[in-house]
């Protein structure tokens, strides 16, 4: 199951992504925001990231105006690996090499068709494991030094 969240800057693109997830037959939960009224992206990013790390959802899709704020906020949660992607290749590689569990998109940066292709690559790509396990295994070591 997938969790989807946005702030006001990502609200319109989130609606497109929700329709796309329905068309794909994906199970998902939209945890807000539910209007285009101004709100604070860290609240939604934290809630989604904590739920993914806890195992409530397999993956998450976060949207704000640029995707930058959502990705920064989500990555503050220990165990979250949120990747901001602007093309299909970066979405594929963040899954293969980094086992990214959250995808960030910029609602004011990319159009709906490109966003759908990015979501597809993110959801359809598996983590390669192998040498990449050693590398992502170093992330908690970095966190512990903070």
Image (cartoon, rainbow, N blue to C red):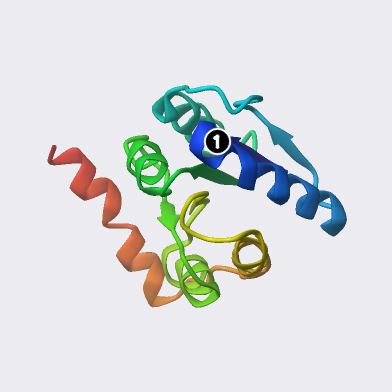
Quarter of the image where the N terminus is located: top right
Percent of width and height locating residue 133: 40, 66
Image coordinates of residue 119 in percent, x first then y, are 63, 61
**In front of the other: 74 or 20:** 20
Q: Which of 89 and 131 is in front in this view?
A: 89
Q: Residues within 10 Å of mark 1 (few under 14, many from 20)?
A: many
- Residue 40 seen in the current view: yes
Instruction: Report whether 130 appears left or right of 5.
Output: left
Residue drawn 39% across and 71% down?
132
Q: Which of 129 and 6 is in front in this view?
A: 6
* Residue 58 appears in the figure: no
Question: Depth check: 5 or 75 in front?
Answer: 5
| Residue with the mark numbered 1 | 6
Looking at the image, residue 20 sits to the left or right of residue 47; the answer is right
The correct choice, above or below, for 96 with respect to 6 in the image is: below
- State which quarter of the image contains the C terminus: top left
Quarter where residue 15 is shown: top right
Q: Residue at x 86, y 56 (%)?
A: 23
Q: Is residue 85 left or right of residue 52?
A: left
- Give x and y (percent) for residue 7: 51, 32
The residue under the point 52% across, 60% down is: 110
- Helix, strand or loop at disc 1? strand
67 above or below 8? below
Which quadrant of the structure image shows residue 145?
top left
Q: Is residue 103 above or below residue 97?
A: above
Q: Where is residue 129 in the image (x, y as percent from the top left)?
A: 48, 71
How many numbered callouts?
Answer: 1
């Amino acid at each position: 199951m997938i969790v989807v969240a946005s702030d006001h800057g990502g609200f319109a693109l989130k609606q497109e992504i929700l329709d796309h997830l329905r068309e794909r037959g994906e199970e998902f939960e939209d945890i807000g925001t539910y209007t285009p009224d101004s709100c604070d992206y860290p609240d939604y990013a934290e809630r989604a990231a904590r739920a993914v790390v806890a195992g409530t959802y397999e993956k998450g899709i976060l949207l704000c105006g640029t995707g930058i704020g959502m990705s920064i906020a989500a990555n503050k949660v220990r165990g979250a690996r949120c990747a901001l992607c602007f093309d299909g290749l970066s979405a594929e590689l963040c899954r293969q090499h980094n086992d990214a569990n959250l995808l960030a998109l910029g609602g004011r940066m990319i159009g709906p068709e490109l966003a759908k292709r990015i979501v597809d690559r993110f959801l359809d790509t598996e983590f390669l494991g192998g040498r990449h396990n050693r590398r992502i295994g170093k992330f908690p070591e970095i966190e512990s030094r903070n």
